[in-house]
Image (tube, rainbow, N blue to C red):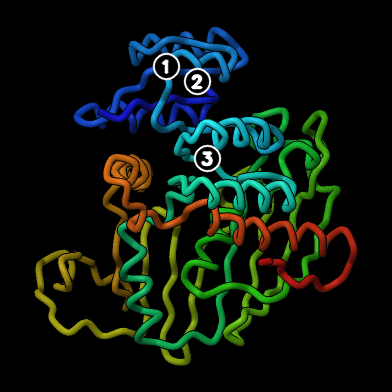
Amino acid sequence: MIKVAIIGCGGIGRYHLGHLLQFTDFTKVVGVCDLIESRAEDFAAKTGAKAYTDFKVMYDEVKPDAVFICVPPYCHGEIEYETIRRGIHFFVEKPIALDLDLAKDIREKVAAKNLITAVGFQCRYSTLVEPTNEFIRNYPLCYVDCVRIGGVPGVDWWRNKNLSGGQIVEQTIHNYDLVRYHFGDPESVFTYGARGYVTEVPNYNTDDVSVTSIRFKNGGIGSISTGCYATSGESFDGKITFSARDARAELYILGKLSIFGVKPEETTKSEETEVIKGDGNLARSEGGAVVYNETIDAGIPCDRTFLKAVESGDPSAIRSNYEDAVKTLSFVLACNKSMATGRQIMVDYN
């Protein structure tokens, strides 16, 4: 039985707790910690674990095998260093830091201790990943375009770019990570940002919208646009489009994948729709597109894969460990640097 602790009992901690409560066949939550005692006590009531407000005291008393670090972006550093010092395997929510040098130092210390790590890029565990990769294998891409437009989250620290890193780093990092995962590592970026549209939110200090142009190491180019100015879902249609010369795939993250220009090898007709028979996935034909729908909560295999790796000692199934997540952090921080300097920035992977 793996002993698991949680640091950070806010919204994202609750998300992971919901998964952990499904893994009681091989895990047990033994400690929960938050600076707000009532939040830790709420988690404790759900798990039977002990509540703490000091994570070091929790480590001393419950001695976990693994920990989920679910704290805001500006809180990283001390927790990771202490966790590494004690040799505890850890899952950490994105973004893993706001300072690249800090993340690189943690990366080196993780490697020195040979710890198993995972990062909260659950979109990599979506059932849409494999059909997306299959499309890219069969149709060499010329261009990738990504858009994510939404509103301002109701969290005070998110509105302050110094604490959150801004929308690119804290929120749209999922999209940046998936573009990198599917299309390859970026070489350089140029990002424009704009403010002045969001005027009704108190204590607001971040970019309303940004556009990033990307050159990838493989020679391809792409763009990612993101904004938090929307007050309605009608504002923009957010998706990632992977474009080949004669076909395209439109990925609605954790929603559906629509592939245009691809003729399915085998189909059956019904009164309502055309059903595509593939490699175990079923899709529908809509308006000339082959459509795959998300069938799971991708966070469940994300969390379970990490815990199974801790149980077995084999981390090979983890799709984003700390070392890999540093590359995605380098990507998004390069965009912030470009916005701040008005220059093209090379992405730092060293």
Q: Which mark is residue 246?
A: none
Q: Are circles 2 and 1 on residues that touch, CB within 8 Å?
A: yes
Q: Nearer the viewer, residue 123 or 321?
A: 321
Q: Amino acid at mark 1?
A: Val
Q: Which residue is mark 2?
A: 59
Which is closer to the viewer, label 2 or label 3? 2
Residue identifier under label 1: 62
Q: Position of residue 21 (x, y in %)?
A: 30, 26
**In the rendering, at what x and y percent does residue 286 appear?**
29, 70
Disc 3 versus disc 1: distance between alpha carbons?
19 Å
Relative to the observer, which residue lies in front, 65 or 211? Answer: 65
Q: Residue at x 42, y 16 (%)?
A: 62
How many residues crowd around disc 1 within 10 Å: few (fewer than 14), some, or many (20 or more)?
Answer: some
How crowded pointer 2 is (Cα within 10 Å; few <14, some 14-19, many 20+) is rated as some
Screen quadrant of the C terminus: bottom right
Residue at disc 1, secondary structure: helix
Mark 2: amino acid = Tyr
Above or below residue 232? Residue 178 is: below
Please state the horizontal and vertical placement of residue 232, each as a whole percent of the image: 60, 45
Is disc 3 placed on a helix, strand or loop? strand
Residue 97 as seen in the image, left or right of residue 192: left
Asked if residue 348 is positioned above or below residue 36 in the image, the reply reads: below
Q: Give the left or right position of residue 97, taking residue 40 as reference.
A: right
The residue to which callout 3 is attached is 92
Asked which quadrant contains residue 325, the reply is: bottom right
Residue 190 visible, this angle: yes
Residue drawn at x 29%, y 43% is 308
